[in-house]
Image (cartoon, rainbow, N blue to C red):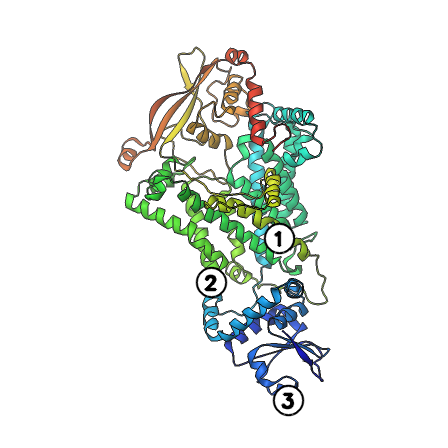
Amino acid sequence: MSQELRVQTPPPKPLLVFDGDCQFCRRWIARWKNATGDAVDYLPFQDRAMAGRFPEIPREHFAEAVHLILSDGSVCSGAEAVFRSLAEGGRQRWLLWLYRKVPGFADLSELLYEEVALHRTALSKLDRIYAGPGLELPSYIWVRFAFLRGLALIYLIAFGSYWMQLDGLIGIHGIVPAQGAMAALKEEAAQAHMGLQRFFMVPTFAWWSASDSALHWQCGLGVACALALLAGIAPAVMLFLLWALYLSLCTVSGPFLNFQWDTLLLEAGFLAVFFAPLQLWERPSRQTRPPVLVLWLLRWLLFRLMFESGCVKLMSGDATWWNLTALRVHYETQPLPTWLGWYAHQWPPSVQSFCTLVMFAIELVVPAFIFAGRRLRLVAAGIFAAFQVLILLTGNYGFFNGLGLLLCLPLLDDKALLAFRNRTVPAAEPLPGAWRPARWPWPVMLCLTILVVPLTMIPLLRTAGVRQTWPAPVGWLYGWTQPWRTFNGYGLFAVMTPKRPEIIVQGSDDGRNWRDYVFKYKPGDLRRAPGFVAPYQPRLDWQLWFAALGGPRTNPWFYHFEYCLLQNSPSVLALLGPNPFPKSPPKYVRALLYEYHFTDRATRRGTDAWWRRELKGLYAPPLSLEDFRHAQGLAAESRANFVSKLGFAGGNR
């Protein structure tokens, strides 16, 4: 607390006096020196230069607490001295603001300071174990540089791969035409007399136009912005545009752009807007420090991704997770396995159970390391990275694993990245006379944190099974922000799929002889090896995996897919393999349901087959164009289903 005294011979600039015999004090003084630079001088009270220099302060007081002596002669000690010295150095002024303005913060800070001072010896040992031997203040300039470049690549993959499939999925002649869905939405909005509110409820640029050319423009702009971000051009602006464009496409793409990694990309991209430097051209040599609060929000995102993934498996009550048998079927029942997944499926049951146990440790225990010291954070980053690589090797999950690896970067610091770089880490700040780029004001960062933490805590606690009543404003804000798909809950495979139903679509000219439609990536031919597709994600192949778990009535888009096949729609056929009806479309289409299993090693050697299958029956009966023409309202039902999934009904959400 502030001392009721002044010194007669004040120093020319602030001087922090500490106990030089205390190892704990020396370690923290070294860190504060890195934070304050030349703005504050530091001197142990045992130094000869201190002999008789400040007689107004009893010598034993210096041994009890640090003292900050200011150039005007005023003196403060304890926690206030720490906060004031950091503020004098231009760092963390918000701590001093909290100390002075927030009731109770000063008393709590001083109480904690006294407790630390009383247990300095034990805390010094813990500090070395927790934070490591280094004393320098961690820098994250190169971490941010690498993170933004990696995010640019993820966005480039996301927009580029979807652009290649857009016409067949949501184009005017696609499976779920966005133009028809937007027409229904506009009609709903007109009936409900909706104004600008419709842009918040259904955030998409397709309100202005949902034509094929407009959708292609959105994908093209996304690719252009990703390339600009990769080149370091106006990173904050590019990141905001990328977030808005991807959100727009997600909103109008129905089931095809609604996977967890799509929402994960939106959340990571939104936080990256505030993580990016406010520069027209990003250069690591001319940057201020990344905002610490946003760095922690990115770590918080990784924590939720991993921890919730473990929680949903246990909270679902699925017996295969509880008895550790889930991985015995996972590799063959996942949407798009790889040929390495076939080999992983052959492991003994005891190994599969052990791997399941390790997975739970990674998802439920290791996330706690994210908020630990540097050493444990680096361990967590390594474990998470290895985990993502193993998933990538055994299954195709689009850009999810790349994004998961990218989210490990905020756990590192510039010193850790030296292992991957030959150049030295740049100074944490430009020289005093150098040009300083603009930075996000700390009140903006504080408001962002106050917004993000409660809105993401809601799905986290729900996933963990905690029933919490939130204040009405928080609940209202959570509901209002849901259409943005930016504050999400996560967790894949909450319930393990024990079997693999697979849809085989067939066409016929006479209703008796049927020919299979070949898909490029999903299982079909028993002798075709499961391939590597990621980071490209074939959205139709993926959606057919979900459709097989239900039925055509719960997947109305499937009927429209068959309708497109009866017309030999070029844009839809481009999503498939060779067309079995190249000259004219079939007169009938139907869908059979098979149950697929990986073969064992002996069968694989004897037959060269990767799969075996059993016919389970019809998935969808034979249909012709006449059947579709007589089924009045089918397209309207499909559009209505799409609208209801958006939550847009009568202007209420």
Q: Nearer the viewer, residue 226 or 315?
A: 315
Name the residue beneath numbered marker 2: 375
Tell me where residue 359 appears, x and y as whole percent: 39, 48
- Precedes in sequence: disc 2 or disc 3: 3
**Residue 275's disc number:** 1
Give me the C-alpha separation between circle 2 and circle 3.
Answer: 43 Å
Q: Nearer the viewer, mark 1 or mark 3?
A: 3
- Precedes in sequence: disc 1 or disc 3: 3
Q: Is residue 260 left or right of residue 548?
A: right
For label 3, the SS is loop
What amino acid type should be assigned to the residue bearing mark 2? Arg
What amino acid type should be assigned to the residue bearing mark 1? Phe
**Number of on-image labels:** 3
Q: Quadrant of the N terminus?
A: bottom right
- Precedes in sequence: disc 1 or disc 2: 1
Name the residue beneath numbered marker 3: 52
Can see residue 575? yes
